[in-house]
Image (cartoon, helix red, strand yellow):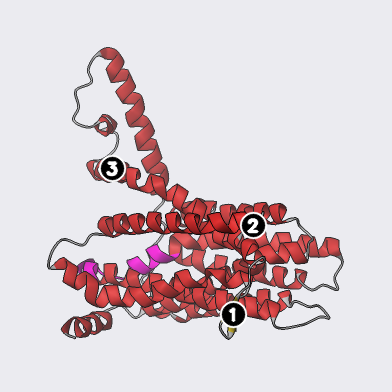
Amino acid sequence: MAEGKGLVQSVRTYPPAVFFMLGNEFCERFSFYGMRAVLTLYLITEHRFQESQASLFYHAFVSLAFASPLIGSVVADNYFGRFRVILWVSLVYVMGHVLLSIGAIPQLDHTLRSVLDFSGLIVIALATGGIKPCVSAFAADQFGDHQAEQRTQFFSFFYFAINAGSLVAIVLTPMLRGRVKCFGSEYCFPLAFGVPGVLMLIAFLLFVAGYKYYKISPAAKGNVVFSVISCICYAAKQKVCAACRGHDKVEHWLDYAAPKYNSQLLAGVKSLVAILVLFGPLIFFWALFDQQGSTWVLQARRMDGRVGPFTILPDQMNTFNPLIILITVPIFEAFVYPAARKVCNVTPLRKMAAGGVLAAVAFIMAALLQVPLLFSVH
């Protein structure tokens, strides 16, 4: 009980700006995951894609959405700053949803629909990538240097907002698609895409509403990603040259980048290289995890979704991940982590390691369950 009261007191010390950011993140994630939840079935039913084609296109869209944050970070850091990038890219984001919603109207010419749909998807992928690296960093900027603990704690709630938006979207948009009829069609994809567009507009308005509370920093005129890559390449080159001369005597190979690169950057790059061993397996994790929107949805089309009085639609199969996260995040933040800190130091790296082990166990269980299903299909 005391830990719970301590959490409430800590939240009261948060800068007012971050509460607008939480609402903004909830709505933006609703818009993205809501649209993405029905995308695979939309490509199959409305554009007559084969399942393999729909899956390929879906993952191309997701890949672009996950690659574009590099562009967003460069633009924010070097030119416009995080605030302006979030502001203007959010409007572009809304326009992408508008294009996709109009393109879903079945009475339109098929060529026009294709142009609208695929243009909308490209815009959405670039826009979500433009925002992604800026929002969390902008929220972190709102905390003072003396609020390191509150900042760390806030990101648990930030992650909670992401998953809350995801959960509501994955439950609601498939229902709008499959249980509402419009424009003389069995499915109402214009509504399923339109509602996420409205939520993105609300996200934009929430962000604007918090303007007077924000701490807005100018563009830094330098991108840390490029600095890190340049530092690593320079150090590697100097190490090879030193080895050829027989002078390979530094403590760490990255020390060859000194004095061209300052000690603060070198320390950060050394830490990054050290944890890449942990980050490497995440590539495989996300490759499997994102099958939820394609392979698992297609699999669910062939399954009986009835569970007691309820029927789970194929594109609602992803509901359980955000649901479990929403249940466990408050419990961990209020009770589990405070109790664990009495035994050991609870660091983000240790949290990630424990989560990685649990994820591996979960995928093994999923694979074992898939085997009899494959045999039953064949």
Determine crowd level at label 3: few under 14, some 14-19, many 20+ residues with C-alpha closer than 10 A.
few
Q: In the rendered structure, are the residues bearing label 3 and label 1 in contact, judged by CB atoms less than 8 Å apart? A: no
Nearer the viewer's eye, disc 3 or disc 1?
1
Reading the image, the residue beneath label 1 is 172
What type is the residue that disc 3 sits on?
Ala
Q: Is residue 268 left or right of residue 28?
A: left
Magenta segment: does it hold 281?
A: no
Q: Disc number at residue 368? A: none
Name the amino acid type tagged 1: Leu
Q: Position of residue 67 (x, y in %)?
A: 53, 51
301 or 229: nearer the viewer: 301
In space, the residues marked 3 and 2 are separated at their CA atoms by 33 Å
Q: Quadrant of residue 155?
A: bottom left
Q: Which mark is residue 58?
A: 2
Q: Residue at x 46, y 76 (%)?
A: 164
Give the labeled residue for mark 3: 274
**Rendered location of residue 136, percent (x, y):** 40, 65
